[in-house]
Image (cartoon, rainbow, N blue to C red):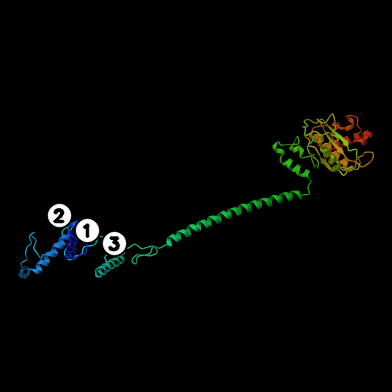
């Protein structure tokens, strides 16, 4: 029963204050004021006390008359009653509803629609003022009305300039490659043309060799063991050297020349080219060791098979100090055709002059070993002597 009376008393005090408050909060404030010894810092008690005094003044006729006469009674605490009181720190002025704790961090209470509309109006006006003054930052994709948009044209121009430079560099690189390829193509064509022109000339290879030897005559160049100017005077022949091999062209050096030997092919009716082919086959057949430096055909053509500074397998005991000449023929007696004879005399005369020899140094194969070679000139001694006299005439 006592508990119910206590709660009823608390409810009456709560209703007397005119404010909906938590009953436990009122008990806490009363306890805190009792401990501190006064009402300092208690907003709700000051508010309730002010409202109670105002109600007593209105009910007291004396105070009402005093207020009408301009006399304001003074309360026991020394404060004039009826005067506007400023709330001290921790107190709240009379007539203002305290803010509930659950409303402090949230939106305004919905119990006062007029005050809420006023607050919204103030916020909207403040937002409009700040927006008009350019204080708001533009959100993404928007821009304040009073700000001039940044022109992107310089950045675009810079990017276009860089792109143009890259394109020019690529074009220059491609042009350089094209020029290099064209230069290589022109060089290849010119080289082929020069080779074709050299191959299409009708002059024999000997004439070209003479020209080259004559050009190098004053430079001390040696050609096949002879000075270039001496070598350039040789009669026309075709150089067609054998493939180096131990059976026909061993490649051993011919250091000195003391004699020139004349041979015949012992195979009537064969040409110089055929006999040269026979010498070439020895590298494969290995039938015999046979060759010569020169072969004169029955039409007068001369083929050089072995260089003059290398030995040939012609005279077994004299290969290292002599030069050998094979002659083709058509007659059964081994006599030479006039074309073969003329080419032989011309070649012998040049070799005698080139190696500072005499006509007496010209020998038959028969003169070294007794082999009847050449056949016609072993049977006709007078014809052999006449041959040497014809050499001396040149």
Which residue of the protein is positioned furthest toward the front in this rendering?
A: 1
Could you tell me if residue 54 is visible in this image? yes
Q: Report which residue position mark 3 lands on.
A: 106
- Provide the secondary structure element on which disc 3 rests: loop
301 and 75: which one is in front?
75
> Residue 285 appears at what percent x and percent y?
84, 38
Q: Quadrant of the N terminus?
A: bottom left
> Residue 2 appears at what percent x and percent y?
17, 59
Marked residue nearer the N-terminal end (3 or 1): 1
- Provide the secondary structure element on which disc 1 rests: helix
Contact, mark 2 vs mark 3 (Cβ under 8 Å): no
Q: Report which residue position mark 1 lands on.
A: 24
> Residue 53 appears at what percent x and percent y?
11, 64
Q: Report which residue position mark 2 lands on.
A: 34
111 and 300: which one is in front?
111
Q: Quadrant of the C terminus?
A: top right
Marked residue nearer the N-terminal end (1 or 2): 1
**How far is the residue under mark 2 from the one under mark 3?**
32 Å
Marked residue nearer the N-terminal end (2 or 3): 2
Could you tell me if residue 389 is visible in this image? no
Which of discs 3 and 1 lies nearer the camera? The answer is 1
Q: How many marks?
A: 3
> Residue 236 appears at what percent x and percent y?
81, 42
**How far is the residue under mark 1 from the one under mark 2?**
15 Å
* Residue 386 against residue 151 in the figure, above or below: above
Q: What residue is drawn where x is 46% and y is 59%? A: 159
């Amino acid at each position: 029963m006592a508990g119910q009376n206590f709660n009823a008393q608390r409810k009456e005090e709560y209703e007397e204050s005119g404010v909906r408050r938590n009953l436990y909060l009122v008990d806490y404030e009363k306890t805190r004021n009792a401990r501190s010894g006064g009402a300092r810092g208690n907003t709700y008690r000051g508010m309730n006390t002010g409202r109670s005094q105002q109600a007593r003044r209105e009910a007291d006729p004396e105070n009402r008359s005093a207020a009408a006469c301009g006399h304001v009674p003074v309360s026991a605490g020394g404060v004039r009653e009826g005067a506007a009181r400023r709330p001290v720190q921790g107190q709240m002025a009379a007539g203002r509803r305290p803010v509930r704790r659950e409303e402090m961090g949230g939106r305004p209470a919905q119990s006062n629609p007029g005050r809420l509309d006023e607050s919204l109006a103030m916020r909207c006006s403040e937002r409009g003022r700040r927006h008009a003054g350019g204080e708001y930052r533009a959100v993404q994709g928007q821009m304040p009305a009073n700000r001039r948009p940044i022109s992107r044209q310089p950045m675009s121009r810079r990017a276009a300039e860089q792109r143009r430079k890259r394109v020019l560099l690529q074009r220059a690189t491609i042009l350089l490659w094209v020029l290099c390829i064209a230069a290589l193509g022109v060089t290849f064509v010119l080289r082929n043309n020069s080779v074709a022109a050299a191959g299409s000339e009708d002059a024999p290879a000997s004439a070209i060799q003479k020209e080259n030897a004559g050009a190098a005559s004053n430079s001390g160049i040696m050609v096949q063991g002879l000075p270039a100017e001496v070598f350039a005077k040789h009669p026309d022949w075709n150089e067609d050297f054998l493939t180096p091999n131990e059976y026909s062209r061993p490649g051993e050096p011919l250091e000195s020349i003391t004699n020139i030997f004349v041979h015949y092919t012992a195979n009537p009716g064969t040409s110089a080219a055929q006999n040269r082919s026979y010498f070439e086959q020895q590298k494969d057949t290995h039938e015999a060791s046979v060759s010569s430096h020169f072969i004169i055909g029955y039409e007068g053509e001369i083929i050089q098979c072995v260089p003059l500074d290398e030995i040939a397998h012609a005279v077994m005991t004299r290969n290292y100090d002599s030069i050998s000449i094979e002659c083709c023929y058509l007659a059964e007696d081994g006599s030479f055709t006039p074309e073969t004879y003329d080419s032989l005399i011309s070649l012998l005369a040049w070799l005698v002059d080139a190696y500072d020899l005499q006509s007496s140094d010209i020998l038959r194969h028969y003169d070294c070993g007794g082999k009847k070679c050449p056949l016609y000139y072993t049977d006709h001694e007078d014809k052999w002597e006449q041959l040497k006299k014809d050499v001396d005439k040149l």
